[in-house]
Amino acid sequence: MKSDSIVIIPTYNEKENIENIIRAVFGLEKYFHILIIEDNSPDGTADIVRRMQQEFPDRLFMVERKGKLGLGTAYIAGFKWAIEHQYDYIFEMDADFSHAPADLPRLYAKCADEGYDVAIGSRYVSGVNVVNWPMGRVLMSYFASKYVRIITDLPIHDTTAGFKCYRRQVLETIELDKIRFKGYAFQIEMKFTAYKCGFKIAEVPVIFVNRELGTSKMNSSIFGEAFFGVMQLKWSSWFRKYPQKK
């Protein structure tokens, strides 16, 4: 059955989570498709997805890549696949249940019913809604978002959020091949570019829960890319002409 919405989930060593997250999304009342971007996980994640594709042949899709090539490039590959297959609403979501599948319909409604172009599952729009993170990481993430807002003038509380819904027009407009960052800064660059292109962005309050299974992919180099990348984004924006929403 055709769906207007696809959820893109990048994976690397997510065997503990992947089946459960797929079933959780497919268990929702709203009918979603899923696209897995699999970076050659040595733990057998792809084998689990292939087995589940036999159960859900019309809803579950996978793009397999040759190795761990970065979060940003995974999503760019997924966006291009989703555009090619004419989905109207395209989602980013983690495999580890830090983003609750039950919030997907809320993001969808913000775009499909309320007319926004991008809906962000926001940890910070209504306080600090993070569970099971060490305090140091909570503070780092919170103040990183504050820092991004100060440098870029983005009217968004959770500038580093990775749980989002886009209208297809956004991804068709913002020149995906010009998105430069691969790690943490990718999420910032996507929001900043959408904003500079004139798209309407809304934040939907969500509760972010730290993963219980598997290993986090976050490291200090990813934060470093974000810190310096924000300044590069601001500087380059002074000399770049952004395509505008039609």
Image (cartoon, rainbow, N blue to C red):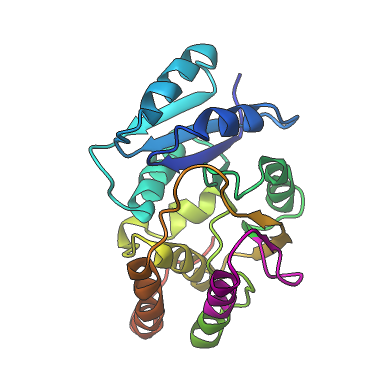
Q: Position of residue 185 (x, y in %)?
A: 41, 68
Q: Reply above or below: 61 against 159.
A: above
Residue drawn at 50 percent across, 32 percent down: 18
Residue 238 higher or lower than 140, as above or below: below
Marks counted in the figure total: 0
Range of residues picked out in magenta: 122-145
In percent of width and height, residue 39 lies at 32, 39
Q: Quadrant of the N terminus?
A: top right
Residue found at the very far top of the displayed protein? 54
Give 46 or 8, whichever is nearer the viewer: 46
Which is more toward the observer, 2 or 227?
A: 227
Quarter residue 222 falls in: bottom left
**In the rendered image, is residue 144 in sight?**
yes
Note whether 165 is above or below 138 in the view shown: above
**Location of residue 56 in the rendering, given as x and y in whole percent from the top left corner:** 54, 17
Please report the residue visible at 64 percent of the width from the left and 58 percent of the height from the top.
Answer: 132
Residue 164 picture location, percent across and down? 58, 53
In magenta stretch: residue 117: no
Q: Is residue 135 magenta?
A: yes
- The residue at the point 55 percent across, 72 percent down is 141
